[in-house]
Image (cartoon, coloured by chain):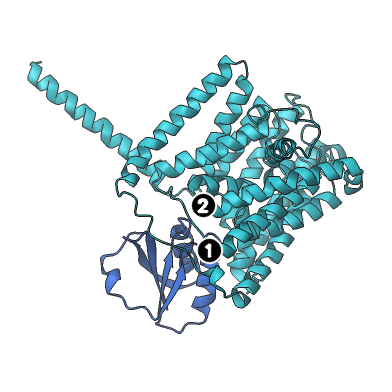
Chain colours: A blue, B cyan
Amino acid sequence: MPEQENLQNIQADHVLDTKGLSCPMPLLKVKKTLKTMKKGQVLEVHGTDPGSKNDIPNYCKKHGYQFLGYEDNPENYTRYLIQIE
Amino acid sequence: MPIAEEGEDMTEQASFIKGEIEKAHRTVFLTPWPAWVSGVFLAFLALLIFMWWQTWGIAGGFTNWGDWFFYRLGLYESAPQQGVLLNGWSVSNIGLLVGAFGSALMSRQFAVHRAPRLEYGKGLVGGGLMGVGSAIAAGCNVGGFYSALGMLDLGGVIMMIGLFAGAYLGLRYLLWEMEHVRSAAQSAPHRGSGSGRDWSRAAPYLGVLVFLLVLLAFQAYSWLGHTQMGGLLFFGFLIGLVMHRGRFCFANAFREPFMTGDSTMMRGVMVSLMIYVLGVAAMKWAYIQPPGAGVIHPFWMGSLIGGVIFGFGMLLAGGCASGSLWRAGEGHLKLWLALGGFFLTNSPTTRLLDQSGFRELLGGGVFIPEIATWQGGLVLFYLFSAGIMLLLVWNEQTEKFTAF
């Protein structure tokens, strides 16, 4: 999944912190949080597990969420952005 | 040809080779592998280990480490028969860990991953449960399930059922924990490791160095007359690489059908088994290896009980026996604790079962071709595999089994 340039400008409705957690906790929390959100809202996930870079986009693709992209933050974590369609 | 042009030719060739190396590096180490690709390589490597030595497993190595640990503490009277560097399972485990470390360096994914306190506890307890489960089932997710089924031992099928049940229960626990445990123990002690930005640039060169050191270790084994052990180190190393690149994980395989419905990993495991069984059948049927090799799993009680306990443990730990090894190689401290918990419980439980006579009550190995003939046994195995695949895909579409 390519990193996108305009991710920094996106305002998230909800931020989920999974830093330090490893598989399966990040995806479990993402699934649970997405279920509580409304159409059009954006979820921002912070994570450090390398596996999430495959898991989160794949999960979104299979379950009809729009994966807006991820970017590596200089503070050694990755930001993921997901929109409910 | 004038000399000047020849020089230009040389630099052109050098930059061509450099470009090709970069392309190969990107393909192998920067692009994630699909699960089934790892599965195919894994089957191939497991078969090589079977030809070269005997059945591949992981828990046996942890038993050896635990035996030494308790012997050194003075709690066991006799020393283990083999040293850590001369026990085949132990050596291939070391290879697996080093292979994942090398692969993580090559992929620039190696980092010391710290975790919240609660996660460390789960790593230790989950590892401990895996140690107990694998002692009861006479093998972990590899020896008790993957290789057991590969060797056409019926206990492998039973452990598969146990692992699904344990993974389901483990997932229910994780969901409960998310709802009810909201303490400081959940928050991450994350801080930017920030030590040197050049680290990730240098990492692939260190990865090459790790590879060269493993080759050197193989030579050393060979000179000392232990070529077989050297080979196991090397095959283990390749397994670590293959598993890391595909993030090949049995905990994921058994959990995802209940968590997200996704069956990509489990189908990768089944593809791998379908190749593994074919190879083992060829070797056993042709008497290249004895037909009874690896048929030791306690059908049905041991495999079932051990499977459930192991499955629950691997959900807590976030990795099975092989997954904990390769994740430890990638730098996850939680999984180092899982490895510790594993050998601390596995060795005493194994001893207790053997000495108390409980082992016999758990059951014994059942060789599928012996009860169903070679022809029938293989047909049954492939029908079983096809049935599992269909069930997985059906669940992916209907999410009938997903827990929430």
Q: CA distance from mark 1 to mark 2?
A: 12 Å
Image coords of residue B178 (percent x, y): 59, 73
Residue drawn at x 63%, y 28% is: B85
Q: Amino acid at mark 2?
A: His
Residue drawn at x 76%, y 29% is: B285
The correct choice, above or below, for A2 with respect to B5 in the image is below
Image coords of residue A5 (percent x, y): 26, 65
Closer to the chain start, of discs 1 and 2, is 1
- Labels in figure, total: 2
Tell me where residue B117 sits by quadrant.
bottom right
Relative to B5, is A73 on the left or the right?
Answer: right
Residue B401 appears anywhere in the view: no
Relative to A9, is A81 on the left or the right?
Answer: right
Image coords of residue B348 (percent x, y): 78, 45
Q: Secondary structure at mark 1?
A: loop
The image's mark for residue B354 is none
Q: Amino acid at mark 1?
A: Pro
Q: Chain of mark 2?
A: B
Image coords of residue B338 (percent x, y): 62, 52
Q: Which of the two marks, 1 or 2, is nearer to us in this view?
A: 1
The residue wearing badge 2 is B332
Residue drawn at x 54%, y 72% is: B184
The residue wearing badge 1 is B116
On the same chain, marks 1 and 2? The answer is yes
Foreground residue among B375 and A80: A80
> For the C terminus of chain B, which image quadrant?
bottom right
Q: Chain of mark 1?
A: B
The correct choice, above or below, for B78 with respect to B183 in the image is above
Foreground residue among B365 and B336: B336
Residue A19 appears anywhere in the view: yes
Residue drawn at x 54%, y 20% is: B220
